[in-house]
Amino acid sequence: MSDPKDWTKHMAIRAAWMSFSRGKTQSEIAQLLGVSQAKVHRLIAFAQSSGLIRIEIAERPLECLELEEALSETFGLRSCTVAPFEPMKGDTDDAAIDEVARVAGGILAKLLESKQIKQVGVGMGRTLKAAVVNMAQISRSDLSIVSVSGSLTRKLSANPYDVVQAFQERVGGEGYFLPVPYLARSLAEKEMFHAQDSVSEMLGKARDSDLFVIGIGSLDDEGHLIRNRMISDAERDELLREGAVGDLMGRFLSPEGTLLETQLGNQAVGLHFEEVRGSRVLALVGGASKLEATHAALRSRVITDLVIDQTLAALVQQRSKGEQLRVVK
Amino acid sequence: MSDPKDWTKHMAIRAAWMSFSRGKTQSEIAQLLGVSQAKVHRLIAFAQSSGLIRIEIAERPLECLELEEALSETFGLRSCTVAPFEPMKGDTDDAAIDEVARVAGGILAKLLESKQIKQVGVGMGRTLKAAVVNMAQISRSDLSIVSVSGSLTRKLSANPYDVVQAFQERVGGEGYFLPVPYLARSLAEKEMFHAQDSVSEMLGKARDSDLFVIGIGSLDDEGHLIRNRMISDAERDELLREGAVGDLMGRFLSPEGTLLETQLGNQAVGLHFEEVRGSRVLALVGGASKLEATHAALRSRVITDLVIDQTLAALVQQRSKGEQLRVVK
DNA sequence: ATACACTTTGAATAAAAATTCAAAAGAAAT
DNA sequence: ATTTCTTTTGAATTTTTATTCAAAGTGTAT
């Protein structure tokens, strides 16, 4: 009780109960706690930011439910969850990603609480990382968390190592990751990695996951590949010229959702998306800038479960309707 | 979407997401929804009051955890949960009961979500009713909910019928209750009831419950027996003279937690607490006025699991320490 | 149609929460 | 011990939320 960090947490919990459960005002709480109203505000803010307080809304708006049904139907999904997100002036793609992460955090927690799933394969990306951070603590020390791709990337706080790490913190299971790069420098280097026993064993293990949780990468400036300098601008331009619209587990996709045979795609160290086809694959994606990539990824039919924000969902649905019309013509 | 009730709910859900998840102000939401700020406030208030929004605080204050441990130890409880409740000027026992109900609602939902429990026996009382109302909706259509006592009581919205009903609404299972009075008018009448096949069958079924959820009754003006005119003032005085401090499943208790052989106690139609000894018995109790009754009930050692408010818990703990000292002396 | 009771609405206002800012209190380095 | 830099604090203020109240709307009985 003397540690100042513990004291803050303890007081934050007391303040949170008085505020949220009893409905007392910050001034009343301040009086009881012997601090200022501003301090009470800070305590409650701390409680919220450190995840001590979880606010759950039982239902999603009709608009979302409709999109869920439409997308499930169009892309043959086993489940689809559309995170409510009505765009308002002043918010960017980041806000959409936050919403997806929040909703996905709840879904992941529920999914993993049942002991059906014994091993999850995880990809990389900002959305994924945020979703795991938003996940409530559960106890699943029997769960294995395996990275499906190479885990060495310069800096980048959303790298596989980091996602696995965060996952482990929340569920208490065992984490595995590949100490090799995400993208090899050459085909030869990639083959060298894959030839190593430790790597192939790891990938073999990853392949056996009961659930894969992955992101969808876009090729614009917002995409993690660009943003984190995993590919150069020249390489990006090359990919765009070849018709790539995004990546799924490090492999590049055409707008039709088929694999684009490129040099760079073959340099990805990790599971190929064709290797997980047929397994349960949960994709998390948010932000309007991911439209092309998401549409392509869904058309690949590898994804079985989707969490997506409302705005992007509406765009994808609209796009797929357009495609259908064009085909009919 | 044209039904005004549905419209309100739908808009409330939209507003709730924007407010709680996105952190938008009511004015921003009002603009998007095309209504006034006051309306947005009302929509969010509606969402909260109708249970669409659930706020969970991950941990309880240290004070509560300490009391939980102390009470578990003293009264041999399998589990004990102390609902945070630091008394502040202006709140009555009702506020404490609310807190117990909130916390208990969460515990019940979690307990029943696992399919371990196939049948619950429920008692009566305000606290119980409130706890069930606070329970999140779960799907357990295989669950049986059985009243452990007679269900006919004049008015009184916390009667067994009502508790079973509310329970059923939340979990979707089957509800059973006894269409006989809670307290018979005489011993003869009670025996007549018990002699009926339907009644004895029902009680037999109730006895097989995997979990009993009950309240603890006090004999002061706050107690449900008095408040709802289930016993007359004269009867109450008689009970007090005989040394009764409260009731457990309709039977009256001495301060030591032993059964008080009284006329009235024998008129209770329903399971006797001795019939559930050894089973899992979850008691819910809140409010400082229940001190004597709670202490006695815990001493009976029938209760295995307890949800209690912080203030009452502290009082009970203090009282039991006093008793111990007196014994040592 | 008209009167009556009862809701629902939003502008205005009161109350509470969030932020700002300057002062005080701690650390870290000299 | 002194200086410097960072952090923490609460009074004051701003911003947001909650309540009040009068007006408009809705349904019902006559």
Image (cartoon, coloured by chain):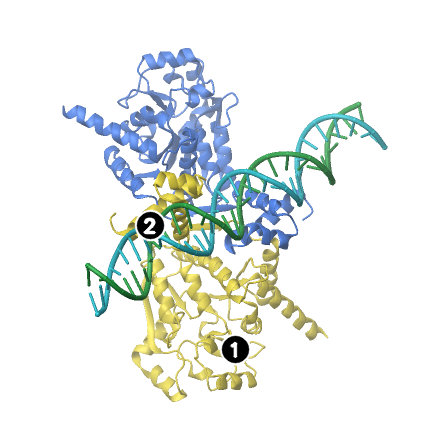
Chain colours: A blue, B yellow, C green, D cyan
Q: Amino acid at mark 2?
A: Lys
* Residue A242 located left or right of residue B38: left
Please, which residue is most extreme toward the left here?
A329
Q: Amino acid at mark 1?
A: Leu
* Residue B223 located left or right of residue A263: right
Per the rendering, the mark at residue A258 is none
Q: Residue at x 56, y 57 (%)?
A: B84
Per the rendering, the mark at residue B9 is 2
Spot occupied by residue A76 in the image (x, y as percentages of width and height): 25, 35
Closer-to-camera residue (A87/B196): A87
A316 shown above or below B180: above
Spot occupied by residue A191 in the image (x, y as percentages of width and height): 41, 16
Q: Quadrant of residue A277?
A: top left
Considering only order in the chain, which callout, 1 or 2, is on the residue closer to the N terminus?
2
Chain under callout 1: B
Q: Residue at x 31, y 27 (%)?
A: A297
Q: Secondary structure at mark 2?
A: helix
Per the rendering, the mark at residue B219 is 1
Q: Secondary structure at mark 1?
A: loop
Q: Quadrant of residue A185?
A: top left
Q: Quadrant of residue B159?
A: bottom left
Chain under callout 2: B
Q: What's the distance in space between the residues labelled 2 and 1, CA to CA?
A: 42 Å
Q: Nearer the viewer, mark 2 or mark 1?
A: 2
Crowding around mark 1 (Cα neighbors within 10 Å: few <14, some 14 to 19, many 20+) is: many
Closer-to-camera residue (A9/A192): A9
Q: Residue at x 56, y 86 (%)?
A: B241
Residue A118 visible? The answer is no
B23 shown above or below B61: above
